[in-house]
Image (cartoon, grey):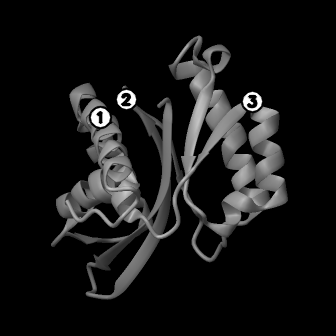
Amino acid sequence: MDKIEYRAVIKFLTKEGKNAKIMATIFWDAEGVLLVDFLPRGSTITGEYYAGVLGHLRDSIRQKRRGKLTRGVLLLHDNAPVHKARRAQAALRDCGFEQLNHPPYSPDLAPSDYFLFRQLKSSLRGRRFHDDDEVKEAVTTWLEEQLKSFWLAGIQSLRDKWSKCIQVKGNYIEK
């Protein structure tokens, strides 16, 4: 599997003790992070916005993973409406990406949920930040600190979980 994408809503406390949140879309593969997109505060992710992000992803892959575009890129998508939007689907085709649809209501099969964001949020837990930029910096730094073996383990865990799902004929998997 060449690519994983997911969004996380990162909730945090400001120095003043106020609750805040920021949305990050992180594209990653077995070698590491390809692109991080932080949704601007007050914005909504739409098909048009996501299409632009996919264009940035294509550029990032071209720079970071030479030859991967010609070998093919597979995106694991959940069933979020933005992924099904016409504009987003057109952008997927325009970028030459193939899409692996995610079974509905299956966070146990979403490596960004059970693997990446769980650990990222754990590393941020208990910290207070002055502003969005400080949160973005903390997230970016944490992502950059992860070794290649971390990312490979995330992809391998996906393979194992999908195999288990097939073995139990699609019934719910807790662990």
* Between 74 and 137, the one nearer to me in the picture: 74
Which kind of residue does numbered mark 1 sit on?
A: Gln
Q: Earlier in the sequence, mark 1 or mark 2?
A: 2
* Between 53 and 74, the one nearer to me in the picture: 74
Whether residue 38 is visible here, answered yes or no, is yes
Which kind of residue does numbered mark 3 sit on?
A: Gly
Q: Position of residue 62 (x, y in %)?
A: 62, 20
* Between 45 and 132, the one nearer to me in the picture: 45
Could you tell me how far apart the alpha carbons at marks 1 and 2 are, in whole angstroms?
8 Å
Whether residue 134 is visible here, answered yes or no, is no
Tell whether label 3 touches label 2 (CB within 8 Å): no
Position of residue 81 relative to residue 92, above or below, is below
The residue under the point 78% across, 62% down is 85
Which kind of residue does numbered mark 2 sit on?
A: Ala
The residue under the point 34% across, 38% down is 159
Pointer 1: what residue?
A: 156
Dividing the picture into quarters, in which one does residue 156 lie?
Answer: top left
Pointer 3: what residue?
A: 96
> As drawn, is 144 to the left or to the right of 6?
left
Pointer 2: what residue?
A: 30
Label 2 Cα crowd, 10 Å radius (few <14 / some 14-19 / many 20+): some
Instruction: Tell which tag, 1 or 2, sits nearer the viewer.
Output: 1
Q: Position of residue 80 (x, y in %)?
A: 61, 66
Q: Secondary structure at mark 3?
A: loop
Instruction: Work out which residue is located at the far top of the displayed protein and give it.
Output: 67
Position of residue 133 relative to residue 52, above or below, is below
